[in-house]
Image (cartoon, rainbow, N blue to C red):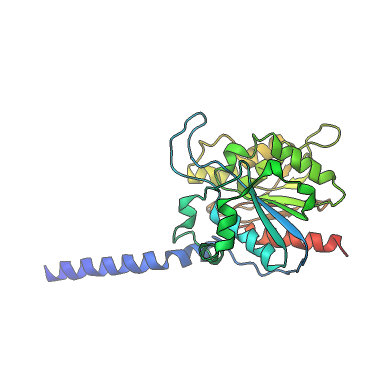
Amino acid sequence: MKKLIAGLIGVVVLAGIFVLALPTILHKAGLHPEYHGPKVALPAKRALVITTSHDVLAAPGETEGPATGVVASELTHPYYVFLDGGMQVDVASIKGGQIPIAPDSLSRMSATPETERFLQDSIFQAKVEKSIKIDAIDFSQYDIIFLAGGWGAAYDFGYSPVLPQKISDAYYADSKPVIGGVCHGVLGLINAKDLDGHLLIAGRRMTGVSDKQIKELKIEITPQHPETELRKAGALYESQTAFRDMFATHVVVDDEKRFVTGQNQNSGLETAHKMMQVVAEQGQ
């Protein structure tokens, strides 16, 4: 009996150690990698981070399901990259007001230093609680337009009549803002059109969350999937893969250097930094 009890205690201790170490293990495996590339400062420049307003993970037409929204890191990573680079950063959403944040993305397993910083940042929290409705914004007044992802974006980014028109207007504006985003955020690009009425992203190299990652996570009930929709829109889709795609990452700058897209939740830091680099190059 004593040996059995000792064995059970040992199992419990090992399980506790594993749980404590799990965030580090996931990080080492590729979840939310650090960014070690070149950085630039853009004082007096402006960035706009746009998120979903949808908060329920359910099949199309249904209204009940787990809470969802924007993935915390896909909001906080670009925000702090831009802010720390000297930029003025505004936060907007499809409907304006309170932005829903996917609860699991705030968990201990998914938390990042930027997420922890957000939870202590009253200014940023106020921007999230009272986000600007995209209808009220002139996108051409910004140097960077970043579309944050998360499952919620699968329900409203690709269906908004306002977002693609704003993206198109910004693309042709004299200010030539750099446009992009990560994961499901790229769905905000699929309906933007050029001056001839053709889809703006057709023929451009782009990425977004892969169909493989969506299948692996078993969240296929959402109405749109980025890889599928980008391909439908004529974009030249590319991605990286891993034993599980949630540990992969990939960032693409299109040949014209107007669009910068990131594959998934791991790509936010690099995507934001590369957008700033492109803006800096434009000003040289």
Q: As displayed, is residue 102 above or below residue 32?
A: above
Which residue is outermost to the left? 1
| Residue 187 in picture, x, y percent from top left | 66, 41
Residue at 67% over, 64% down: 83
- Give the image quarter of residue 153: top right
| Residue 74 in picture, x, y percent from top left | 59, 55
Does residue 190 appear anywhere in the picture?
no
Horizontal side of residue 33 vs 251, given as left or right: left
- Give the image quarter of residue 80: bottom right
Q: As displayed, is residue 102 above or below residue 109?
A: above
All told, the count of numbered labels is 0
Residue at 43% over, 42% down: 66
Q: Quadrant of the C terminus?
A: bottom right
Residue at 57% over, 37% down: 155
Q: Quadrant of the N terminus?
A: bottom left
| Residue 113 in picture, x, y percent from top left | 54, 67
Horizontal side of residue 197 vs 72, given as left or right: right
Q: As displayed, is residue 222 above or below residue 261?
A: above
The residue lying toward the viewer, choosing from 86 and 245, is 86
Residue at 41% over, 68% down: 21
- Give the image quarter of residue 151: top right
| Residue 215 in picture, x, y percent from top left | 52, 42
Does residue 155 appear anywhere in the picture?
yes
Q: As displayed, is residue 233 above or below residue 151?
A: above
The residue lying toward the viewer, choosing from 34 and 169, is 169
